[in-house]
């Protein structure tokens, strides 16, 4: 990018930033915005369809034409039947995109036609393109998505009602979120400023060197933080605290709780577990604190570890390409229950096979409805599935009109070692409950790693943190295979194949973390194995 282009982009950023910081959104205004958006769902959906038809580069334009769908027909279907039935009809006509197609793992083919596209072809053209951010890529290669202050304004309205539902409106709030190229951290800082609840401390799980932050992203971060002071906004700066130094965050939470009577922390699930483990190990009192977590599944084992400190936890569900999908609910008692945010998201499901297994999952298909959404998508399949139900919980989000709940949200992204795939959720219980109970450690001390060596051979390693202590490698492998053989449909076959091929080995190293998240299954890049 040229110096002139940089100067133009920063001047646009200055204008947008000043305009953004002039906003002030209260709790009641947040609720009003949500109510209005629920009322305007159909209008926003029609806007989305219209803009897809206007953009010949968007692959959904090609999918709609391939299916013979006219704009007027879709508009009529929405008016007669509603958005979700219309999306089901479009799905039946081939208007959808699987996660494999989006990630380039599979050709996009409909009606015998190969439809070629780049991920940038899905970008919302109405959003300024001065800055793009990188998703964390927890389960696959990250995606570059436009960063929009307009979308930050639209997304911020969920935050105060969430704090109200969590009885944390008056608590000082810290975050343990990464620095750019991810905007997870700076988004929190900006959102809570216009909500008139500034972030008290920003801990980052990685520093700029570890995050491989480009010069452009470093300058943009400093421009936002220090430039905002010209308009009276004193935004907090990040300070590096790695996952192995969770004690520092736990100490801050304990001190804050003691001084102010409460404390909340926004972080990944793994980071929250690390904080709670550190608090118990060092006898720090964080009872009554609240964790706002996301980025990975909140499993029963991880929730139990958090609640053992006397703290509470709320799970959130966000996908970088789609936006915020679900907001946590404490009213149903389910481990990871979230309200589906139907004001900004339309969702349907479809049954699909998981490659190399006999398993089928009812995967989620999402359609972002807000005009500020970074990408224009129709029936976009994430690599997630779960339980969907309509129920009453009595919390503030039900009162706002969100009565549809998602829970048991898991990825069907998979490891494929020795020609056999694994659904991630099938390993959660083994790595997070069985092994810690039998050999010690916590739910974040074990991980299954797939890596391809320089000869193209796939290796599967059971990662065990050095903090666990001495264990017998063969015994641990035997336990894993025995437990995995109990998985219906394909577990017995997989365990047998792995045993015959001696495919599983133990490696003593700290589980790999990506920007504060430790996933149960981790896939290394080809030719770049991890070393202890």
Image (spheres, rainbow, N blue to C red):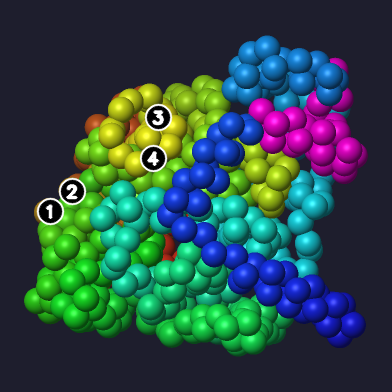
The answer for how far apart the CA atoms under marks 2 and 4 are is: 35 Å
Point out the stretch of residues depicted in magenta.
42-68
Q: Are marks 4 and 1 in contact (CB under 8 Å)?
A: no
Q: Is residue 516 left or right of residue 485?
A: right
Q: Is residue 151 left or right of residue 447?
A: right
Q: Quadrant of the C terminus?
A: bottom left
Q: Which secondary structure dominates the residues rendered in magenta?
A: helix
In the rendered image, residue 63 lying in the magenta stretch gets the answer yes
Pick whichever of labels 3 and 1 is earlier in the sequence.
3
According to the picture, the residue beneath numbered tag 1 turns out to be: 437
Q: Are marks 1 and 2 in contact (CB under 8 Å)?
A: yes
Q: Are marks 3 and 1 in contact (CB under 8 Å)?
A: no
Pick whichever of labels 2 and 4 is earlier in the sequence.
4
The answer for how far apart the CA atoms under marks 3 and 2 are is: 35 Å
Q: Is residue 423 visible?
A: no
Q: Residue at x 36, y 73 (%)?
A: 174
According to the picture, the residue beneath numbered tag 4 turns out to be: 397
Q: Residue at x 81, y 48 (%)?
A: 121
Pick whichever of labels 3 and 4 is earlier in the sequence.
4
Q: Nearer the viewer, residue 458 or 50?
A: 50
Callout 3: 10 Å neighbours few (<14), some, many (20+)? some
């Amino acid at each position: 990018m040229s110096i002139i282009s940089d100067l133009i982009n920063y001047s646009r950023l200055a204008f947008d930033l000043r305009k953004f910081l002039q906003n002030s959104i209260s709790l009641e205004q947040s609720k009003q915005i949500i109510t209005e958006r629920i009322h305007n769902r159909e209008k926003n959906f029609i806007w989305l369809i219209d803009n897809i038809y206007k953009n010949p580069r968007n692959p959904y334009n090609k999918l709609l034409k391939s299916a013979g769908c006219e704009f007027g027909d879709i508009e009529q279907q929405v008016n007669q039947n509603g958005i979700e039935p219309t999306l089901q009809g479009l799905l039946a006509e081939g208007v959808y995109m699987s996660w494999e197609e989006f990630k380039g793992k599979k050709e996009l083919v409909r009606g015998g036609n190969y439809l070629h596209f780049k991920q940038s072809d899905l970008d919302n053209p109405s959003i300024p393109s001065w800055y793009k951010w990188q998703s964390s890529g927890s389960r696959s290669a990250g995606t570059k998505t436009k960063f929009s202050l307009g979308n930050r304004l639209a997304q911020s309205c969920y935050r105060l009602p969430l704090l109200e539902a969590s009885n944390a409106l008056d608590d000082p709030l810290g975050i343990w979120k990464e620095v750019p190229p991810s905007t997870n951290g700076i988004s929190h800082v900006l959102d809570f400023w216009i909500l008139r609840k500034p972030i008290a401390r920003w801990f980052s799980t990685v520093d700029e060197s570890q995050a491989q932050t480009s010069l452009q992203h470093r300058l943009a971060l400093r421009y936002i933080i220090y430039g905002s002071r010209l308009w009276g906004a004193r935004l907090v700066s990040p300070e590096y605290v790695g996952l192995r130094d969770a004690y520092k965050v736990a100490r801050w939470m304990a001190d804050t709780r003691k001084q102010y009577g409460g404390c909340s922390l926004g972080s990944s699930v793994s980071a929250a577990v690390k904080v709670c483990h550190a608090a118990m190990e060092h006898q720090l009192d964080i009872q009554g604190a609240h964790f706002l977590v996301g980025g990975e599944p909140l499993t029963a084992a991880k929730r139990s570890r958090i609640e053992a400190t006397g703290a509470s936890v709320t799970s959130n569900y966000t996908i970088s390409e789609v936006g915020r999908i679900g907001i946590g609910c404490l009213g149903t008692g389910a481990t990871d229950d979230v309200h589906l945010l139907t004001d900004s998201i339309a969702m349907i499901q479809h049954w699909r096979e998981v490659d190399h297994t006999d398993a089928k999952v009812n995967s989620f298909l999402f359609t972002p409805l807000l005009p500020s959404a970074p990408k224009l998508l129709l029936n976009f399949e994430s690599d997630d599935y779960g339980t969907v139900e309509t129920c009453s919980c009595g919390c503030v989000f039900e009162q706002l009109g969100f009565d549809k709940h998602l829970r048991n949200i898991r990825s069907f992204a998979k490891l494929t070692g020795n020609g056999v795939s694994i659904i991630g959720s099938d390993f959660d219980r083994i790595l997070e409950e069985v092994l810690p109970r039998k050999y010690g450690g916590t739910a974040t001390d074990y991980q299954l790693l797939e890596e391809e060596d320089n000869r193209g051979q796939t290796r599967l390693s059971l990662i065990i943190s050095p903090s666990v202590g001495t264990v017998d490698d063969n015994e641990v492998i035997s336990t894993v295979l025995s437990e995995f053989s109990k998985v219906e449909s394909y577990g017995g076959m997989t365990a047998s194949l792995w045993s015959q091929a001696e495919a599983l080995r133990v490696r003593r190293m700290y589980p790999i973390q990506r920007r504060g998240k430790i996933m149960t299954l981790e896939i290394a890049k080809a030719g770049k194995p991890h070393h202890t």
